[in-house]
Image (tube, helix red, strand yellow):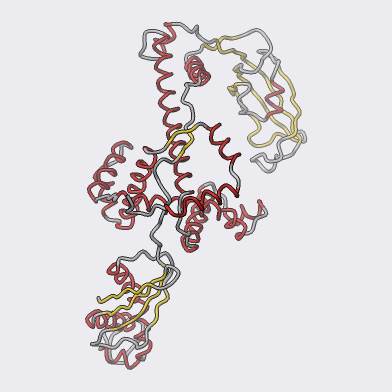
Amino acid sequence: MKTQVSELADNRVRLDVEVPAGDVDHAFDHALSDLSRSIRVPGFRQGKAPKPLVMRQVGRDTVVEEALRDHLSGWYSRAVAVAGIDPIDRPTIDWSDEPLEGAPFAFTAEVEVKPPPEVKTYKGLEGVKHPTEIPQDAVDAEIERLRSTVAELTAVDRGAQEGDFLVIDFEGTMDGRPFDGGSGSQYAVELGTGRLVTELEQGLVGMRAGEERDILLTMPEDYAAEHLAGKEVSFHVKVSDVKERVLPELDDEFAMSVSEFDTLAELRADIEERVRIVVEAESERRFRSSVLDALGAELQTPVPDALVQSRLQSMTRSFSQTLQARGVALEDYLRVTGMTPEQLVEDMRGQALDLVRKDLALEAVVAAEGIEVTDAMVEEWVREQAAEADEDVEQAVEQLTGDPAAQTALRLDLAAQKALDIVTENAKPITAEQADAKQKLWTPEKETAQESAKSSAIWTPGAS
C-alpha cells in the first residue's frame, strides 16, 4: 500500500493512500458475497447466484457502498501503520474517484496527530517526601487486635455495658402484631459494634442475665425492609447471658500464644518492622506522585483537546461501570445528585487535563532517555505479576499475546514507569512545610518573570 504523508497546520497530517488493485478486487468479492446472501435471484439458491447477476440486481452503487463500508477503515489503519503516525482523533476521509475492479483506489485522510511533547526539564524537580516515623499507635492497635483474638469471655453479674457480649431472645411487634424477621432465639451480639438498630442496642445497656424488657423504638427511615422503615415497633427482649472480654496480660506468654516469637519484645519489633514497610512504601508512593505533579507542570506542549476528550470518555465510562458494579445506574446517580451528564463531564475535565499533561510529560522523558520496552520485558513483567498473584503464569502470558492492543498498552505503561523512575531518582525531596511555603510565595508576576528568564533555555527531547 502506497502512503504519502504531508504535514498540515495545527498538528494535522494528510495521508495520500493508494490501495492495490488486488485489495480492491477482494473488497468487491467480499461485498458481492455478503449481498448475495440477502437477496433472491430466480433460478439460484440464496447465496449461490453468480456475482455479475448479483451486481446487476442490487446495482453497482450498492456494491461500492458495501465494499467501502467493510474495508475503508482497515485500509486507513494500514496506512496509519505504514506512515508511523499517532492519530488522536477521527479522520476525515475523501476520494475523487470511486473504486473500480482491477484498478488501484486512491483516497486521502486528514487527521490530528499527537504532537511531540516537550518539557522544560525533568531532572532536579522537587517532590514532597513525607516522614517515615513508625506510628506507635498503629503498633499498639495491632497488639490490641491480637489480644482480642485470644481473649476469654467471662460471665458477669452486672448490667450490660459497651463491649460486653450478650445472648438474647427477642420478638418484635408492630401495632401489636409480630412481623417477619422480627424474632430470634439465642442471638449473640456485642454491644457497641452496631449490628443492631441503634435504639435497640442502646435499650440493652444495663440489662442483666435473666432480665426481660420491652424496648420501644422508631425504625430508621433508610431501613432495608421498606415495610418497617420509619415505623414505630416494640421488641420484647430476654437476656440469658452477659459476658465481658477479658484480655490477656501483655507478656511473653501472650506473645507465644499469638505468634512464633518467644518474647513480647520480639513480637513488637516484628510488628514495627511490618508497619515500617507499609509506611515507607506509602511515603515513596506519595513522593513519586508529587514528583509526577511537578513533571506535569514542566510540559511545554499545548495539550490537544482531542486527547482530553478521549480521556474524559474513558473516565465517564469507567465511572459508570463502577456505579453498575455497586448496583447503581448512572441515570439514578445523576437524578439523586441533581447533576446533568454535561455537568458530570465538566467536573471531570480538570482531572482529565491533568492526567493527559502527565502522560505527555512522561512521553517526553521516554523519548529523551531512549527508553525501549521489548516484548520479552513485557512477558517477564506479566509472569512476575501472575506468580505474585498465584495465578496460572502460562495462561496469563497466552492471554496477553492474544491481545495486541493490551500488549501495546502495557508496553507504553512500562515505558512510562521507567521514565518516572528516572525522574524520581533525580528529584529533590522537600518537606510538606517547604512545599506549602513555596506555594505561598508564588505569584503570577513571579511566574511570568521566571518564564521570561527561562525562555531562551527550554529543554526538548534529545537535548543533552
Tell me what residue is drawn at x 39 percent, y 10 percent.
256
Q: Position of residue 87 (x, y in %)?
A: 39, 66
Q: Position of residue 73 (x, y in %)?
A: 35, 73
Q: Is residue 137 above or below residue 331?
A: above
Quadrant of the image occupied by residue 7: bottom left
Considering depth in this image, is 462 or 206 the residue closer to the camera?
A: 462
Considering depth in this image, is 415 or 174 the residue closer to the camera?
A: 415
Q: How many marks?
A: 0
Tell me what residue is drawn at x 61 percent, y 60 percent.
342
- Screen quadrant of the N terminus: bottom left
Quadrant of the image occupied by residue 26: bottom left
Considering depth in this image, is 411 or 121 the residue closer to the camera?
A: 121
Considering depth in this image, is 268 or 431 the residue closer to the camera?
A: 431
Q: Is residue 55 above or below residue 131?
A: below
Q: Position of residue 6 (x, y in %)?
A: 35, 74
Q: Position of residue 8 (x, y in %)?
A: 40, 73
Q: Is residue 103 left or right of residue 326?
A: left
Tell me what residue is drawn at x 71 percent, y 18 percent.
212
Tell me what residue is drawn at x 35 percent, y 54 percent.
461
Q: Is residue 116 above or below residue 206?
A: below
